[in-house]
Image: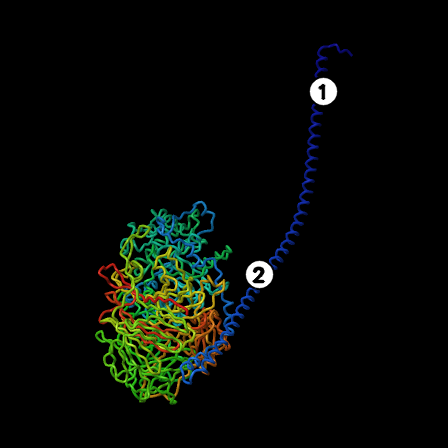
Amino acid sequence: MRWSHPKNFFIITLLGIFVLVSFYLYGSLDSATTEQREDTVRHLMEVDRLKQKIGALQNQLHSNSDKMEKMRNELKQSEKQRKDLEIKNENDIFDARENADAALVNRLDQDLKGDDEKENKEVLDMPAGNKVAIVHQELSKATARKHQCSFMANYSNAKTNVQMLDMYSIMSFENVDGGVWKQGWQVTYKPESVKIEKKLEVILIPHSHCDPGWIMTFESYYTERTRNILNGMAKHLQMKPDMRFIYAEMSFFERWWAEQDEGTRERVRGYLKSGQFEIVTGGWVMSDEANAHFYSIITELIEGHEFIQNHIGTDYRPRTHWSIDPFGLSPSLPLLLSEANITNAALQRVHYSVKKRLAQEKQLEFMWRQLWGGSDSRHDIRSHVFPFYSYDVPHTCGPEPKICCQFDFKRLPGGGHSCDWGIPPQQITDANVEKRAFMIYDQYRKKSQLYKTNVLLVPLGDDFRYQDDFEWNHQHDNYKKLFEFMNQKTEWNVHARFGTLSDYFDALDETLKTESEKLPVLSGDFFTYADRDDHYWSGYFTSRPFHKQMDRVLQHYLRSAEILNSIARIQGKSTENIEMSKLVEARRALSLFQHHDGVTGTAKDAVMIDYAEKMLSALRRSEEISIASLSSLLDMKTVRMDFDEIRANQDSLPEMRTLEIGSSLILFNSLSHQRAEVSCIQISAINGRLKTIDGTMPEQQINPVINVVDGRIQVASNKFELCFWAEVGPLSTETYTLSVNNDQAMANIKGNSKPMGLDSSFTFTQTNEDFVLKNELISATFSGITGGLRDATLEGVKIDLNAHFVRYTARPKGRIKNGGGDDLSGAYLFLPDTDAKKMEITQPAYLLGQTLGNLFKRLLWRRGQRRLVFRIKSIYGEDRTILRWQCDLRLQFRVETISFTDLNNLQMIRRRRMLDKLPLQAHFYPMPGSAYIEDSNTRMTLIGAQALGVSSLKNGWLEVMLDRRLQQDDNRGLQQPLLDNRVTISNFRLLLEPIVAPTKDLESSPMGHLSSTAHHHSLKLHYPWIKVLTKDAPKSKVQGLSASFPCDHHLVTLRTMVGPTDYQNNLQVKARPEAALIVHRWVPECRVTKEIATGSCANTDKLDIQTLLGTGVKSIHSTSLTLLYQNSTPIITPIEVEPNRLVSSITSTTVSTSTAGLATSTSPPSLASLVFNVSTALVLMPYGFLYPIVILLTTRPYLDFTMKLLLGNFSIVSIQSLRTTEPSTQIVSTINFKSTTRRK
C-alpha cells in the first residue's frame, strides 16, 4: 500500500486532528463532571453539618426551655416570698398601729379614770344641789369608746394616682391663652398614625338639660318647654330607630307621664328597655353638690327611683349618672350613687385649670375613690370629665368652638339659634359632605388625643333642646349623612354613631378589657369651681341664706313626719286619717329645691318666691302628717294639736304660739338616742310652771320675751319664755302640763338702757360697768360701754375675744389675664375688691338678764333703728373645755393651723391656703354643715344648721359668710342683681376640743373627721325638739324605739314607701306595707380624750331592728340605697352596719321597713369640749352698719347661741354685700371673731 498520494495525506491529517480534539473534549467533559461531583459532595456535607447544628440548637432550645421553666418557677417563688414579706410588713405595720392605738386608748382611759376620780372628788366636795353635781351626772353618761378606736386602722387615705389637694399644690394656675382652645393648647395628631391605631369609636349622645326652675318657675318651664321635649322624644324615637336620647330630671318626667295615655307610656317603656332612650341618674332633680345635705340628696334620689319602680317597671333601673351643670362636684355623690348601684358618671363643671392638667396627663377619665377608701374600690365610680368650657355643642365636639358650632344643626337658618362666631351650619349634601365630614372628624380626632382609649363621648345638646321637629329632624338627618360618609373612609379609621351614656360606658368597658387597660384612681373634690380666670363660683355658697335655712327646717319637719307616720304603721295604729299624698307633696317640694339653681339661691326673684311657697306648703303638710300620726299613736284623734311655731308667709320668720294655763306640751325626740337638753316655749302667764303627767317638775325658769319696736328694746306683755330641762327617749314623746305655781325662778336684769314694759317681777339695775357672766366652769367678760364680748376665762386660761363683723366691696370691671372681658360679683361669683373691712358698732345699748336659777343669762344690744339679736343658751359641757366664739378665730399658738370643711354633712376634707397663687375668693368653700381649724393641740369646730360659705384666710381664722347683697349681675345667665334679702336666722354651735397631735401619716392627710361630740350636736341642731301644743294631755306616750341606737349610729330616715300614683283619681297614692330604714354610722377618731355627754346611747356595734322597732316588723331584706335592688332572702338581725358604707335593707311590717346603713367618716371625740350654739338672724342694709341688740348667755358648761339681726324697716344682711354710692360696689358683711389666748 502506498501513502504517497497527497489526497490521502490530507484525509489522514484531518482524522488525527479529529481524534485529538475528541480526546481533549472528552477530557474537559470528564473534568467538569468531576468538579460538579465534588461540589455536590461538599454541599451534602454542609447540609449534614447544618442538620447537626440545627439538632444541637434544638437540644439547646429544649435545654433553655427547661431553664426558663425553672426560672419561672423560681420567679413565682420569689414573687410569693415578696408578697408574703409585704403582707408580713403590712401586718407588722397594722400591729404596730393597733398597738399604738391600744396604747393611746389605754393612756386616754387612764386620763379619763384620773379625770373621773378628780371629778368625783370635786363633786363630793361641793354642796348638795350645786350645778357641778348636775354636770357630773351628765358627764357620767358619756359612753365608753373601747372598740371604736380600732376602726381607724381600717380606714386610710385613698390609694390613688391623683389626689386633688396634691395636684393643687403643684399647679401654677396660669391662665395662658391656648389659641382656638382658649383654656388649653393647640391639639394636633398625625394623620398617618391614625391608620394603624385601633378604630376610633365616637358615641354622639343627644340630650336636653332641663332646669326645674331658674329663669322661669318649674311649672312655666314644663308647660312652655319640657312638655314639648318629651313629646318629641316619644314621637321621633319611633320614627328614627337609629336615634338615641338621654334625660335626667324625673320631676318633669313625672309631670309629663301623668298626661300620657297608656299607649304612649308603653311605647316609652319599650324605648327604655331597648336602650334607645335612657334615664340618667333618675333623681327628682340634678342635685346641687355644694349646699345640699345628704338627707335631701337621698330623698330626691329615692323620689325619682320610686317613680321609676312604680310606673316604668321593676325591670328598668338607671345605670349611669349625668352631672353636667352643678357648680363644683362632691365625692359624696359617688358614695351615694355607688350604693344605689350607679357606677358610671359624666361630669362637666370642673375648674378649667384642673381640666387642662388632667387632659395633659390623659386622666380625664378616672375611678373616683372616697377619701377614706384606701385600696377599697367598692365605692369607686368610673368618671368621665368633659374637657372644654361648657356642655353645649360648640364646646363638646372638639377643641375649636368656631368649628363645632357649625355642626349644631339647631342653628341652621329657621332654627331660632345662631353661632357666636358668625359662621352658621350648613345642610349636609352630596356636594359638601366630604368637606364637612372631615371638619367634624378632625375635631373628633383632636378631642380623642385628650383621652386614654379609642372611645369618645360627644354630647349633642344644651339647655331645653329638642323642643321642636326642626331640631329632631335636622340633628338626626345631617349627622346620619356625616356618619355614613366618615364610617366608609377607611383611612380615617373611625366609626361614629348615635348612642346613650350607657352605650358609651359599655364601649369603654369593652376597650379597657380588651386592651387590659386601667383608668387612674382619683380622690378629692372639685371645689371651688372657676370657669375662667379668677372667676370663682364661691358666692352661691351663701346667696339667699333665708331659703337655705328654710330648706333645713323643711328637712327637719319632713323627717319627723316620715318617722311618726312609719311608727304609727309599724305599731298597727289606725292610719286612715294620714293622707300619703300630703307626704308625697312634701317630699317632692324638698327634692325640687335641691336643684342646682334652687338651694344654691341662683334663680330669679319670682322663682325663689315660688320655691319658698312650695316649701311653706310642704312645712304645713309635714306638720299635718306629724299631728295626724301623733293623734293616732296617742289615741287623741278628736283633739286639736298645733306645732309651737307658725309661719304666716313664705318670706316671714316663724312666730311662737303661746301655751295657756291648763294646756299641755308634747315633746317629740326624732333622734335615735335618748335626748337631754334645755327646751323653751312661750307661755301666757308669768306664774306658769310645767310638770310631767306623773307629776314631776323639771328644772325651769321664766324669762321676758324681748322685742324691738321703733328701734327700742321692749318687753312683750302677757307673753313669757319658760325654759326647762327635758329628757326624752329615742323616737319617743314626753308630755308636760302648764299649771299655776308662784315658786318660779325669775330673771334679774341690769344694763345701760331699761327696756320698756318690763314686768315688775323682774328686777332691773342700771349700770355702765363691765360685767361678767359666769358659772362654775366658765366666765365671760363684756364691755360696760359697748356690751361687746371681750374675753373668757376657763380654769385659769384667759381667752381674749374680739367678735366683729366685716364687709367686702365688689370690684369694678377690669381685664382678665388672657384678654377676655371681666365680670362683677353676682349670685354665682364672689369677686371682692379688697380684703374685708371691719364694720364698727358704736353707741349700742345693752341689757343683761340673769336668773336666780342660773339656767340663762342674757345680754341685749341695740343702736338706733337697726338691731342685732344674739342669744347664748345652755347645754351641758366638759369642765376643762375652752370655747371661742368667732367666725374668724385667731389662736395664739404660733404654729400653722389647718382647716377642714364638710361635704354634704357626710365627710370632712382638708383645705389649704394658697394665697400666693390663688385669689381670696378661691379660698371660700361650701360649709353645708360644719368646719373646723386645729393645730397640734386644739380644735375649734363650727357646726351649722344651714349651708353657708366659709374660709380660713389666716392661721387661726374661721370666717363665715352670712349673707350677700349685690347691685349687679355676674353674667352667668341669671340677668338680675341680688337684692331680695330677708331677715334670716342662722344657727350654729361652736365646739372647742383639745386634741392629741396627729401621727406622721395623718399630718398631711386630705381626710378629716368630726368628733362624736360634734356629730351629736350637729344632729341636735338639724333636728331640734318637735313641740306640739294641745288642750288635753294624752294618757300615754309614744315609744318608737325600745332602746337607743349605738352611739355612732344615726337614723337618717324611716320612710314609708308608696305605690303608683292614681292619675285618674286626684293623684292619690297609697302606702305600701314597707318602709326604708336608712342608718348612718360614723367612724370615731381617737385623737381626743373625752366626749361631752350627749344623751344615753347603746354601747354596741350591732342593730337589732326587730327588737328596737317591735313586733310590727315581719321581715328585713337587704336593698340598694334607693331600693331599686332587693335581696329576696330575708336577713337575720341583729345586723352590723359597716362604717363608711351604705348598707340598705327593706323590712315588712304591718308596714315594712327597709334599712340602709350609711356609714361615713366621722371624727374625733373631744379631750374637753365647750359648745356654743349660735343662731343668727341677719339682714343686710343699704348702708354699711350692723347694730347688736340681744345676747343671751347661760351658765351651762357649754353654750348655745342665737343671733338675730332686725334692722328696722330696712332689709339688712350680714355677710356679703351692701350698696354704696357706686353701683359697681358690693359690701359683704361676715362675722369675724379674732381671739388670742394667754395662759396664766
Q: CA distance from mark 1 to mark 2?
A: 95 Å
> In the image, residue 323 lies at what x, y percent?
38, 62
User: Which quadrant is home to the C terminus?
Assistant: bottom left
- Residue for badge 2: 86
10 Å crowding of disc 2: few (<14), some (14-19), many (20+): few
Q: Position of residue 329 (x, y in %)?
A: 39, 62
Q: Which mark is residue 946?
A: none
Q: Which quadrant is the N terminus positioned in?
A: top right
Q: Quadrant of residue 745?
A: bottom left
Q: Secondary structure at mark 2?
A: helix
Q: Is residue 449 above or below residue 97?
A: above
- Residues 410 and 1024: in front is 1024
- Name the amino acid type tagged 2: Glu
| Residue 1070, horizontal then vertical, whole percent | 37, 78
Quadrant of residue 881 in the image?
bottom left
Closest to the observer, 405 or 382: 382
Query: In this figure, which residue is indicated by the disc labeled 1?
Result: 20
Question: Between tags 1 and 2, which lies in front?
Answer: 2
Q: Secondary structure at mark 1?
A: helix
Q: Nearer the viewer, residue 951 or 820?
A: 951
